[in-house]
Structures are given as structure tokens and as C-alpha cells.
Image (cartoon, rainbow, N blue to C red):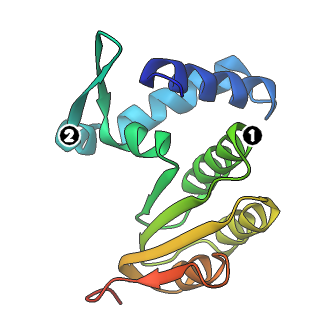
Amino acid sequence: MFSATEFQDEFRKYAIKEMGISSMQFYYWDKLQANIYDNVMSMTPYILEERQMRVTQIDIFSRLMMDRILWLAGPVNDLMSATVQAQLLFLESVDRNKDITIYIDTPGGSVKSGLSMIDNMMLCEADIKTVNTGMAASMGSLLLGAGTKGKRSTLRFSR
């Protein structure tokens, strides 16, 4: 099991080495993420993770990814698609025998971006659990349906 910092470093290394993303592109993507989600990040809860006499502060989404949980919220676009695909490939490379859970809350969006995520979901040997947590409209409904048969669900008040 990776520590939070090791997990983030491994994801960066994987994106650069295995996905062929240049370190400069990764740097700009990271900065872009910070700018786009600046207001969200200020609202993003951070938790303290205790491990073997160490305490680390980590954002909740990184912690969820450590538990093989991805959060797909907002419009489906190229940035979301690239992020989710990289996360799927990374989690697949860490352990292809453990399920990956994707929580979906999206009004839909780009068909091209959504279909590339679905292709990647189908490529994974790990079972993909999909859960509708709010709305899965348009491309979101296709993403929800792309989960492994028998592992697709929707919460009571989601649409």
C-alpha cells in the first residue's frame, strides 16, 4: 500500500513514463487543474492520514483514489476524460484483480470524450462498478451503463 505522497508521485511517474506525457505537459495540466478547481479546492476537505508513526494531509479525492474510487462529476469534456482514463490505467497497473468504483454525477457532454472513457473502461481487466449519485444524463447514462454487468447501481434519489 502506498502512502498518499507515494501514490501521487507514482501517478505522476505513470503519466509521464507510461502514457508518454511530457513532464512539462504534466506541469501545465497540474497548474490548469489548480486554476480550474481553485474555488472547489478551497472547499475540498482535507483529511489527516495516520500511517506507521506518520501523519500526512491529503485531499479527499486522492484518498478515495487510493481506495480505487473515482469521482466523475460535472460536464464530460476532454480534461475529465484524460484524467479519468489516466486514473483507470494507473489503478489497473497497480492491481488488475481489484474492482474500481466510479461514482457518476454528470449532465453529460462531449460524445468523443465519453466514448474514449468507455473504451478505457472496457479495456480494464478489473471489474468497474458504476454508481449514479445525482444525475447521469446523456453521455453520463452511457458511462453508467458501461460498468461491469451486475455491478451498476443508482442511488434512491438520483436521476
Q: Assign the N terminus to one quadrant of the image.
A: top right
Answer with the quarter of the image where residue 116 lies: bottom right
Q: Dot 1, how many residues are within 10 Å of its Cα: few (below 14), some (14-19), or many (20+)?
A: few
Q: Identify residue for label 2.
A: 45
Residue appearing at x 52%, y 18% in the figure: 6
Residue appearing at x 49%, y 54% in the figure: 70
The answer to whether 38 is drawn above or below residue 159 in the figure is above
Q: Dot 2, how many residues are within 10 Å of its Cα: few (below 14), some (14-19), or many (20+)?
A: few
- Residue 93, numbered label: 1
Residue appearing at x 44%, y 37% in the figure: 33
Image x and y of residue 59, in percent: 31, 34
Amino acid residing under circle 1: Ser
Residue appearing at x 52%, y 62% in the figure: 101
Image x and y of residue 135, in percent: 37, 81
Amino acid residing under circle 2: Pro
Q: Secondary structure at mark 1?
A: helix
